[in-house]
Image (cartoon, coloured by chain):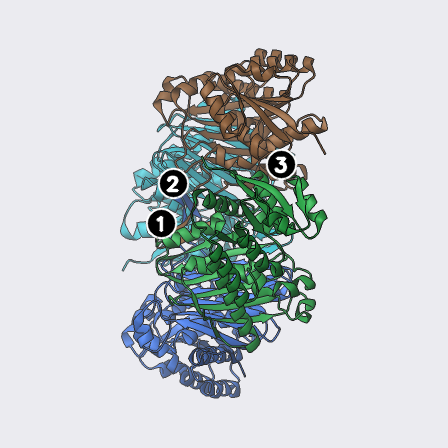
Chain colours: A cyan, B blue, C green, D brown
Amino acid sequence: MSAQIRMGVVGAGRIGRLHAENLAFRVPGAELVAVADVDLSAAEACAAACHVDRAHADPRRVMEAPDIDAVLICSSTGCHADQLEQAAAAGKQIFCEKPIDLDLARIDRALAAVEAAGVKLMIGFNRRFDPGFGRARQMVLEGRVGTPHLVRITSRDPAPPPAEYVAASGGLFLDMTIHDLDMARWIIGSEVDELHAMTAVLVDPAIGEAGDVDTAVLSLRYASGALGTIDNSRRAAYGYDQRLEVFGSQGCVVVGNETPNRAVLSTAEGVVSDTPLHFFVERYQEAYVNELQEFVSCLQQDREPSVTGADGRVPVLMALAAQRSRLENRPVKVES
Amino acid sequence: MSAQIRMGVVGAGRIGRLHAENLAFRVPGAELVAVADVDLSAAEACAAACHVDRAHADPRRVMEAPDIDAVLICSSTGCHADQLEQAAAAGKQIFCEKPIDLDLARIDRALAAVEAAGVKLMIGFNRRFDPGFGRARQMVLEGRVGTPHLVRITSRDPAPPPAEYVAASGGLFLDMTIHDLDMARWIIGSEVDELHAMTAVLVDPAIGEAGDVDTAVLSLRYASGALGTIDNSRRAAYGYDQRLEVFGSQGCVVVGNETPNRAVLSTAEGVVSDTPLHFFVERYQEAYVNELQEFVSCLQQDREPSVTGADGRVPVLMALAAQRSRLENRPVKVES
Amino acid sequence: MSAQIRMGVVGAGRIGRLHAENLAFRVPGAELVAVADVDLSAAEACAAACHVDRAHADPRRVMEAPDIDAVLICSSTGCHADQLEQAAAAGKQIFCEKPIDLDLARIDRALAAVEAAGVKLMIGFNRRFDPGFGRARQMVLEGRVGTPHLVRITSRDPAPPPAEYVAASGGLFLDMTIHDLDMARWIIGSEVDELHAMTAVLVDPAIGEAGDVDTAVLSLRYASGALGTIDNSRRAAYGYDQRLEVFGSQGCVVVGNETPNRAVLSTAEGVVSDTPLHFFVERYQEAYVNELQEFVSCLQQDREPSVTGADGRVPVLMALAAQRSRLENRPVKVES
Amino acid sequence: MSAQIRMGVVGAGRIGRLHAENLAFRVPGAELVAVADVDLSAAEACAAACHVDRAHADPRRVMEAPDIDAVLICSSTGCHADQLEQAAAAGKQIFCEKPIDLDLARIDRALAAVEAAGVKLMIGFNRRFDPGFGRARQMVLEGRVGTPHLVRITSRDPAPPPAEYVAASGGLFLDMTIHDLDMARWIIGSEVDELHAMTAVLVDPAIGEAGDVDTAVLSLRYASGALGTIDNSRRAAYGYDQRLEVFGSQGCVVVGNETPNRAVLSTAEGVVSDTPLHFFVERYQEAYVNELQEFVSCLQQDREPSVTGADGRVPVLMALAAQRSRLENRPVKVES
C-alpha cells in the first residue's frame, strides 16, 4: 500500500479551493496539510472548509514546510513561474495550473529550474482527465477512426469574465483557447505546423476595449497533415459548451455535452432536455478528481506525470501564434 | 455548523461496504467509526479500506457503543428486523436497507419498536436520490405533465444472482421489483389499488427450479385512477437498464439510461455509443451519496427522513400482492 | 416490365383519400381508375384531387367495372365484409383496411368467400411497412437480440376521436390496439396464448359513457414463452407516440418516434427538439406508399401478399379477448 | 386551379434523371414532356423511366419546342451558360443547376441574357428546401438564437468522385463547398467580407495530382460581424455527413444528420443506430421535390423564385476567393 502524500495548496481562489476540497475529501492517498493565499481570509476559509488547520498568507510557508511532500500552484498566472522555482528549490513535487506563464522565455527558465531540482511536475490540463474525451482519444489510438484528418473543437463559456480579468489573463487564446489547443494536440498526437485565427468582439464591447476578443475561429494544420478547427465564444446562453470531434479515414468520434440528468419532457411545445452542466466546476468535476488522483499516483509510484512541463509550454506557443495571426491577419507558422 | 454524526455500519457485504466508503470519504458531516459483520474478515477489510480501526464480528458491539450516534443496517434481509429492534432499544438513529423484512407482521413489530424508542428511521430506497428520477418527479409535482395517467418503468439487471441468493432474497418481486414499486409510488403520489403480474422463466432455469421467476410484466392501478406498468428481467446483455416514464394529460417525461461518457463513434458499421453504466454501484453512485447525505442532514437538523418506515412497508405489501397475483394468475387487490 | 394495375377505391373518407392519392401519384405500376363513396361529393372530391374522372355513389360500380383489376376497400368497418364478398364474387383482387369485421364468424365467412373466388387479399396493417419497425423486425429475425423475451409497445394518439366514432369503431382495442397487437405478433413471430387488460377512462368521460375506455395497459403471454406489454392512450399532448421495443437474450432494439426534422435549439430555457410527426398521415406516409407498392407488386408478380386474411383475423381475436379481460377483470386465454 | 406546367429536361445524368422522375411522379402541377441528352441512350432511358415519349440528343429540340413552358438545365457545368442563353432566347422559364459557370464574367453575360428575355430563373441550391435546414433558418429569422455570432457547417461526401470529374468540376470549392457557402449565406443573411481556406489532400492522392484538394477548413467573416467555419471532406466512411449549427447571442440551433430509421440496437458491444442517409439522392429526396414544387408554383403564380440568378453568382464568387486563399495561403477579401 502506498504512503499518503502530504500536500499544500498555494492560491485559494476558485480553482485552488476546488483542488483543495478534492484533495481533502475525494482523492484517497492525498492528505491536505496547509493552504496559502496572499488574501489570508481566503486561505482560512478554504482551510476550514477542508478541515485543515494551517492557513497562511505567505506561500513560502507552504513551500518550505518540511512535512509537505507536494504543492499545488493555483495562484494567479503571473505568480506561477516564481512559485515553480521556489517549490523546485525546496524540493517539492509540483502540480501547476495552466498556463505556466504568458512568456516563453520565462516558462523555459522555470522548467529548467524544475528539471535541475529533479522534482516531478504536472500541468493542470484537466480536460485530459475527462472520461468522454479520454474515450475519444482511446478510440483514436485504437485506430477506430483510422488516420485522423480533422479535429474539431467547440468551446464556449457560459459567461464572460470581467474585463479586468481578461486583461490579466493574457486574453482569449492564453486563457481559454489554450485548453482546446492542448486537447487537440493530445488527441491528434502531432504538433501544429501553422495556424490561422479569425476573431471578433460580439459578446461584450468592454472586452474589445481591453484589447481582446470574445469570439474566434481557428484553423490548424498539423505536422501529420491533419487539419483542425476550434471555435470559441465567451458567452453561450445555454451554458458551458464543450464538444470534440475527430474525423479520420475510417470514421468519426464525437463527444457531446454532458447534462445534469437524462430526463426528457415532451409537451405540445416540444421535446426538452436540460441544458449542459453549467461551467467547469460542474462539467469537469470528475476530471479534476482524476487529475489529482493521477498526480498522487505518480508520486506514490515514482513515475512521470502524463502532462509534462513541455506539455504546458507548447499550448502557450500556439496561443501566442494565434495572437500574432489575429494581429497580423495572416496564417502563422508555429515554431518551437 | 452542524456536528459530525458518528456512524457504525452493520453488514459489510457489497452494499454495506459501498455505504461505508461513502460515509468515510464522500459525505461531509458523517464520521465512520466502526464496522461489524458476522464474517469478521469482511468487517476488517471494510474498516481498513475506510481507514477505520474498529471492526467487529458481533453487530451488538456497534449497536451498544456509546460513542456511536447512528447505525446503518446493511446485513442480509433476514436480520433487518431484529437489528432494527436492537438499534432502537440502544437509542441509535437508524438507516436500514430494503426490504425491512419479507413478512408484514414482522415489519409492523419492528416499526412499532422504532416508534416506541423515538429514534429516526430512514429506509434505503436509493433511486429516490438519483438526479434523473428526482428531476422527473419534480416535473410531475410542478404539473408539467398534467395529471398522471400512466407510469412506466423498465428495470433490468445485467446478470442474475446465484440461484441460492434468489431463494433467500424473497424472489424477484421482493428483491428487485420492490425498487420499481417504490419508485412508481413515489412519483405518482398515490397508492396501488390493484395489480396483476405476468411472469416467466427465460433467463435461467435454475431460478425457476428455485421457485422464482426472472422475467415479469406488472400492471398497476392506482387509487388516483392512473395506471402503471413495470417490466423486469434478471439479465440484460447490454447492462443495467433503468428507465422511467410518466405520461399525463399535458405531456410525458422520460428518463433514459446513464452512460459512462458521451462519445459516439460513426463508422461504416453504424453509429455507436457506450452501453449503460454497468450496475447499481456505478449507476447510482451519486444517489447513494445523496441518500446518506440526506440521512446525516436529517440527524443534524433533527428532521424526519423523507423515506419513512411506512415507505419501507408499502412496497413489501405490493410485492407480496404481486407474488399472489403470479401464483393465482389473477389481478389482486392491495389492501393495507 | 410489369403491366399497370387498374384500381378502384371504395370509400373516400380520410384513409380512402390517402390511399387514392398514393395510387394516383406515388405508386408506379398502379393506375387509379375510379372512386366510390356513398357520399357522392366525397367520391367526386377525391377523384378530382387524383385527376380521375370516374366517381360513383354506388360501390358496386367499382366492383363490377370490367376494366378494373383490383379494389381497395376503405369504407367504414361495418361494410368491409359485404364488400369483400362482392369484390371476390366479381373476381377482383382485394386490398382491405383493418379490421375485416368486429365479428369473428362474419370474418370467417368473408375470408371463405375470398378463398373460394381464388382472388388475392391483402389486409391494411400499414405499420408493417414502416422502415423503422421493419428494421427492428429484421434485427430480430437476424438474431441480433437473441431469443425475444419481451416486446413492448407504446401507442398513443394525439387526440381522441368523437364519442360517436368510438362507439362504431368497436372500441379502443378493435380500433387502435389492434395495430399494436398485429405489430407485436409480426415482430415476435408467435401467437398470444393469454392476455390481460387493465383500463381506465382518463381522457374523455364521454368515451366512458359510450361504454369504452381511453387508456389501457395490456400484458401478453406468447406461445413461445415471451411476454409483451402494450400501453395505449387516446390523447398524447405532444402528438402521435409510436414506439416499439424488443428485448431478448442478447440485446434490445428500440424504435423511437420520428420527428419532422433534426433541428435542436439550445437556449437558457433548455434543449428543444420538435414533437413527433403529428398523426398517422404524416407518421406513416412512407409506410402507406410501401404497403400499396407491395400490393401492386404482388399482383404484377402473381405472389401472395405478406399480410393475409388470417393476419387480419388474429388481431380481432386478440382484441376481443382483451375486451373480455377488461369486462371480466381477469387474464383471458386467446383461443383460435 | 393552376395550369399544368409543361417541362423539358436538358441533361439526363444523375441529377437530371432525379429531377425528371420527380417532375413525372412527385410534383403535382408539372408535366414532363421531353428529355434531351447528348448521349441519346441516356435521354431515352430517362424518358422511358418517366413514361415520356420524347427523347432527343440535341438540347435545342427541348429549348425550341413550342409546347414546352420551362426547361431544367441539368447538363454538365460547362454547358450551363450557353443553354441559359438559348433557353432565354426561346422564352422558356428556366431552372438551372449550380454552378452557373466557373467564370464570373460568363455568369454575368448569361444572367444579363436571362434578364433581357424577361424569363424567370431559379438556381438549384436544393439544400435550401430541406426541412431541417429550413427549420433552423426559421428559428434564426424568428430571433430564437438572438444575433448570429457563428455559423458552422460540416459537409462530407461518402466517397470522392473520379479524378477526371474533379478536374472538370472546378475543384472542391466550386463543386462541393459551394453548397455550404450558399447555405451559410442563406442562413446568416449577410455577405462574406473575407475568408480563409486551409486545405489538404488526405483522401486520394490522385485528387492532389489533378491540382485539387479533398479536405478543407474555411473561416468566414461576414459583413454583419458574424464568423463562420466550414469543414469538408470528399470521403466520410460512415456516409453523407451534413450538419449545420448557428450560434448566437441567445442560443444555438444544431441540425444533425438524417438516418433511414430510428431503430437503436443495444447489445454487449454497444448501442448502435444506423449511419446517415447515404448520399444526396437519399438525403435530399424531399428537398429536391420541394425545390421543383417551388419552381412550379412560382410559374403558376407568376412570382419570382426564391433562389435567384444573383444567388447563383455569389457562391461562385466566394468559391473563387477560397481558391485564391488556398493558392496564396492568406485571407482573401470577397469583393463583388
Residue C252 in the image: x percent, y percent?
Answer: 41, 57
Discs 2 and 1 share one subunit: no
**Which SS class for mark 1?**
helix
Judging by the rendered image, the residue that carries numbered circle 1 is A295
**Mark 2 residue type:** Thr
The answer to whether A101 is drawn above or below residue B38 in the figure is above
The answer to whether D241 is drawn above or below residue B172 in the figure is above
Find the distance from the CA under tag 3 to the CA under tag 1: 48 Å
Residue C316 in the image: x percent, y percent?
Answer: 52, 64
**Which SS class for mark 2?**
strand
Between circles 2 and 1, the one closer to the viewer is 2
**Mark 3 residue type:** Arg
Dot 2 and dot 1 residues touching (CB under 8 Å): no
Q: Residue at x 69, y 63 (%)?
A: C164
Judging by the rendered image, the residue that carries numbered circle 3 is D137
The label on residue B267 is 2
Task: Work out whether residue B180 or residue B76 is closer to the camera in this orientation and state it.
Answer: B180
Q: State which quadrant residue A27 falls in.
A: bottom left
Find the distance from the CA under tag 2 to the CA under tag 3: 29 Å
